[in-house]
Image (cartoon, helix red, strand yellow):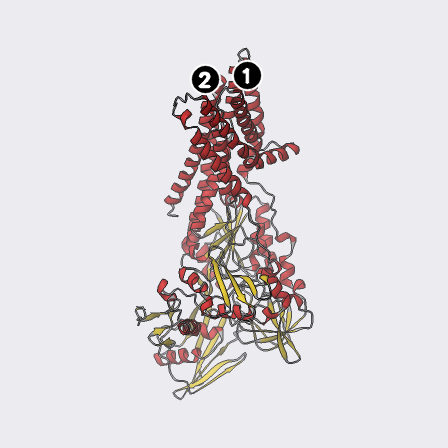
Amino acid sequence: MIAPEQTETKVKCFHCGDFCPDTSISEGDKFFCCNGCKTVYQVLNENNLTNYYNISESPGPAQKGSSNSCFEYLDDPGIRKKLIDFEDEKLTAVTLYIPQMHCSSCIWLLENLYKLNAGVVSSHVNFLRKELSVKFLNDKLTLKALVTLITAIGYEPVINLDAVESKTERPVKNSLYLKLGVAAFCFGNIMLLSFPEYLSIDVRETFYIKVFSYLNLLLSLPVFFYSSSDYFISAYKGLKKKIVNLDVPLSLGIIVLFGRTVFEILTGTGSGYADSLSGLLFFLLLGRLFQNKTYDSLNFERTYKSYFPLAVLKKTENKEVSVPISSLKTGDRIIIRNNEIIPADSILFNGEGRIDYSFVTGEATPAAKVSGELVYAGGRQLGSAIELEVIKEVSQSYLTQLWNNDTFSKPHNMEGSFTQFSNTVSKYFTWAILLVASAAAILWFPDYHIAMGVFTSVLIVACPCALALSVPFTLGNALRILGRNKFYVKNTLALEELAKINHIVFDKTGTITETGISKVSFIGKPLSDFHTDMVKSITRSSTHPLSKAIYDSITKAQLLDITSFTESAGKGIEGIIYGNSIKLGSVKDKKDVNKSTKVQLEINNEILGYYEFSNAYRQEAYNVISLLNRNYKLALLSGDNEGEKENLLKLFGNKSDLHFRQSPEDKLSFVKKIKSGGSKVLMVGDGLNDAGALSQSNVGIAVTEDISSFSPACDVIMEASVFNRLPDFIKLAVSAKNIIRWSFIISLSYNLAGLSFAVEGMLSPIVAAILMPLSSVSMVLYTTAAVNLAAKRRRL
């Protein structure tokens, strides 16, 4: 038997490792934080799969926030057809997205589904993409039963509207990998065949010399015609538009290297430069891979479809059926249960509405709704089930129209400043090099061999390969380091923009405050230990979110027996404990201009005070904001009321711009306004209400508790756990910018020095060809080492 791990008076959940609020939920000597974790353990124990807990300590995902999802919609033929990958008379294959998987225990359990149900033929995990591929027998298992089984063990798949409408394989960009592989293979073999020449070994057999040379020429063909093709195409397209980009001089250098190699080998005048050609392409393509490398498991381009559920319960003739939300029409009656999202603008028809709009508007306090009131799409019901009547289709709802607004989109055809600078330099650089090479050849023309040697030496040594490598290797390595620290940047352009920001705008709810956590404080007469025990006991019996928050806020109390208990919708809860009456309910204070949430406490018909709910700020928020305040202008945009203004003034200082009750349009307008004034804006937010501002800012950072969960469209996804490192992330971006500037200076200095020797005829083509890959290697080493050192200084 395994004894529960204890810390002071707290006990850790055997399944997920979270601390248990008490020891009331147990199975033998094992304690659990909630009934969900206990149920998962029981399922695994009944099927002899408890080895799951031996692979790693407390491996299971927490079940406290798990929803009691209904999967009837998976029996719909239309939805089922879009979800499955393959189906025949006997077998069905499907791939499901499982964001909860996080360790080897998760993989082991999910790949042993066949032990839980004989209908599962096989199951395989793609851990990096958080995907589970399952094959099952049609006569023993249905898609609905499979998803229900996976959910029962704590790994509920994410199945939303966007997942169904875009159920297509992501295009696999194999072309770059193939070109890099070809260049690497040819580079290695050409160097191997060239060793006698490198070591000045006298190979007297002319036959072997010719064989090695022709083999090198043969190996250089796929490098020139296949691996180099992207650079030729880019150069051609640029010239066609009368633009000389960086690929023009690169292509010219590649052509000269290949042409000189073919000429020397076929005429027997030399061994050519096949090694330099293949080495150059290998490093260039490696740099491009670094630059194009992104986080395939993350989605930076989000729409409302990624947030909305796939189906909803529709009420027809006293019967509830699950239907896709895309089929909802005006007048339909729908049922929304606890923690479910409202998919369309509706009128509340029956039940007590307590709608959380924090992700849509930024308002932290849930809105109370009664029958006849309008409820907007995107809100989340907290509490018992409610019945709604749809007044607008999903595509016409307020949230959908807001998301589809053209002003919320960001142009995608922008080039980074360093790319623009490189293209500007190359425009003049190419003509200058051609002029210098031609002039030098003319001066040496009486001697044809020397003239041609000087001409090719100038073009080879001046090839801007080091210049081309500095940007992708610097920014690519910085992206890798930031990603390792849970700060996922969309691309190198976003990283360049991050280095230039001078104005930072914060959202409040969910960004500088803890998501889903409220600070609960009691205001009124001092409570005795017995009164505190009474409050803890009665709130434990309630399903209301505010009751749960009060229950969680009381850490030291004894649970008492309740004689009677009543929970009235819209009024509160009441009961009898040891002959004493207790009531907890909402209180409306007309003098409270900020309309903060309060729950009144009454014991034995005497009002003792009320519990007040306020935002819980991240512990590291003060330090982060104070550090950023030194070098940047700061602003706060909140959809919430001014109830936290005093606390925020202490946090941001009087110089900062604080704005409250901001709609999504207001946030968008504010960002546009300061951008028009010349500011480079960084927007930090987390909800749908921030989507417009995130898109219009120079850089938008979405803060999320889990990178696999929903977040709005953005340039950067940052895990909330590393919010305290935000100043360090920005500093690393600035350091990367400075490293690139220095690499440009070093590269240009090298080119000028090499040119002076080449023009004077002191640099033979073979020496120039050796120096070129050496300069590439040295540039890669410099940029990589410099970025690693900058990161190490900031402990990243």
| Quadrant occupied by the N terminus | bottom left
Could you tell me residue 485's position as x and y percent? 42, 51
Front residue of 636/32: it is: 32
Q: Is 339 above or below relative to 317? A: above
Q: Quadrant of residue 47?
A: bottom left
Q: Which of the marked residues, 1 or 2, is nearer the chain's N terminus?
A: 1
Could you tell me residue 30's position as x and y percent? 35, 73
Could you tell me residue 507's position as x and y percent? 51, 57
Look at label 2 and name its amino acid.
Met
Residue 163 shows up from this direction? yes
| Alpha carbons under labels 1 and 2: distance apart | 13 Å
Q: Residue at x 54, y 76 (%)?
A: 384
Front residue of 744/618: it is: 744
Q: Quadrant of residue 532?
A: bottom left
> What is the residue that sits farthest to the bottom in this orientation?
579
> What is the residue that sits farthest to the right in this orientation?
330
Q: Pointer 1 and pointer 2: residues touching (CB < 8 Å)?
A: no
Q: Quadrant of residue 245?
A: top right
Residue marked by disc 1: 441
Does 252 sit left or right of 647 as displayed? right
Does 313 sit left or right of 273 as displayed? right
Front residue of 380/288: it is: 288
Mark 2: secondary structure: loop
Look at label 1 and name its amino acid.
Ala
Could you tell me residue 511's position as x and y percent? 48, 58
Residue 344 shows up from this direction? no
Residue marked by disc 2: 762
